[in-house]
Amino acid sequence: MNQTVRDTLERVVFAYIRVKYGNILFQRDVQARREVKELIRQAIQSVPEAEAAQKLSSIEEKLELEDQLALQVLIALSRQKNIKAFEIVKERFMGATVKLIKEYDYHVDKNKNYTEIEETAQKAWIKIWKGLDKYDPQKGEFYTWIRTIIIRLIKTSENQALQHTDQIAEVLDSDENGADLDTEVHSMSHEAFRSPEIIFRDELRGEWILQEVFNPRNGYPWQLLVFNLRSMEKAPRQIVCDHAYDPLEEIAITVKDDLLSDSILETEKIEHAFVPLQKAMDSRLTELIPDNDTKTKDSLRDFMEEITHAIDLHRFFGNNPNKNISDWCARVRKRIRKNLNVNWR
């Protein structure tokens, strides 16, 4: 390929990725930028010079080529176990995933069980993540490969009943209640932020999400822990029943153990994500609660000098624990959205 055409194509594809995905993929990471540029160079080798020159001269064809090459780069990054790139690829193909599930899973088709659609979609993408090293771009298109995985999963599990459908329905009591997944199939990878109780269980956790759900800037330790208990499909009244008299440090162990057993992320990364929360819990309440939060200080005045991790959960409840839990989760969810700069409805 002519060097001028090659340089131009490399430049416009990198600009496309930087504008569309840069905040997620590399931010200020210089090494990540270099890796992306190298993968772009590899991707454009497959584009004939005449085709590249022609498409660069047409706005619509240029955008189509940029998107096509960007997808190749994202898939290549995903094969290198880049979780951020994988999240983007997953979102890209989620609509197609849902359509396949509706087409091949007769149970879903007959009963319109949207909880099962979501569950199957997430199971499929966990399989895709784990099997990425087996995907060979030289042997076929990425969509063909994931299609095979999705259909095979449906065929092997179509007779299994979901055990937690009722639980999910029971705890969908936030302001996001009532989503119609049939008309919003493209946004299914965003469901974690629409319903806090499934942010972990039904959504592959990227490092960038994990760092926020345990970050004290998004809530006090007891609020973050309750938020994560909801991710374990526990309704507010179940949390009150099971954990009201547990100290926060025991609840933290429960949350961490569940995450370690279920997450696709390495143990080291999960442990690292817990550090800010643990640091906050090791502080006294008087150090943790700012002076301008007089309402919280007043409600907890009897044990402000205690170490936070040793305080039982019920001490943070007001007259209506179930409402406290729902309010805390809504507050944490809102802050996570803001801090991740997520514009999801």
Image (cartoon, rainbow, N blue to C red):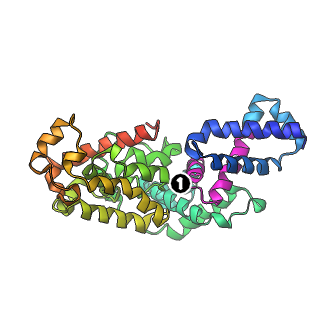
Task: For the N terminus, give its image quadrant.
Answer: top right
**Left or right: residue 60 compared with residue 253:** right
Mark yes or no: residue 190 visible.
yes
User: What percent of the width, then of the height, locates residue 44?
Assistant: 80, 46
Using residue 14 as the reference point, say whether residue 4 is left or right of it.
right
For the C terminus, which image quadrant?
top left
337 lies left or right of 152: left
Instruction: Give the residue furthest to the left.
Output: 302
- What residue is at 31 percent from the left and 51 percent from the top? 224
Q: Does any portion of residue 228 appear in the rendered image? A: no
Q: Specify the segment rendered in magenta.
A: 64-92
In this view, the residue in front, 220 or 73, is: 220
Between 284 and 157, the one lying in front of the other is: 284
Q: Residue 216 at what x, y percent from top left?
A: 33, 47
Residue at the image position 16 percent from the left and 37 percent from the top: 295
**Snapshot quadrant of residue 150:** bottom right
**From what the image shows, is residue 227 above or below residue 184?**
below
Q: Secondary structure at mark 1?
A: helix
Kindly identify the residue that appears in the image at 57 percent across and 66 percent down: 130
x and y, in percent, of residue 227 in the image: 31, 51
Position of residue 217 relative to residue 310, above or below, is above
Quadrant in which residue 246 is drawn: bottom left
Answer above or below: position of 156 versus 107: below
Q: What residue is disc 1 on? A: 102
- Inspect the image, locate mark 1, and give the three-letter code of the amino acid beneath it: Lys
Q: Residue at x 82, y 39 (%)?
A: 7
Please provide percent x and percent y for residue 202: 43, 56
Few, some or many residues within 10 Å of mark 1 (<14, 14–19, 20+): some
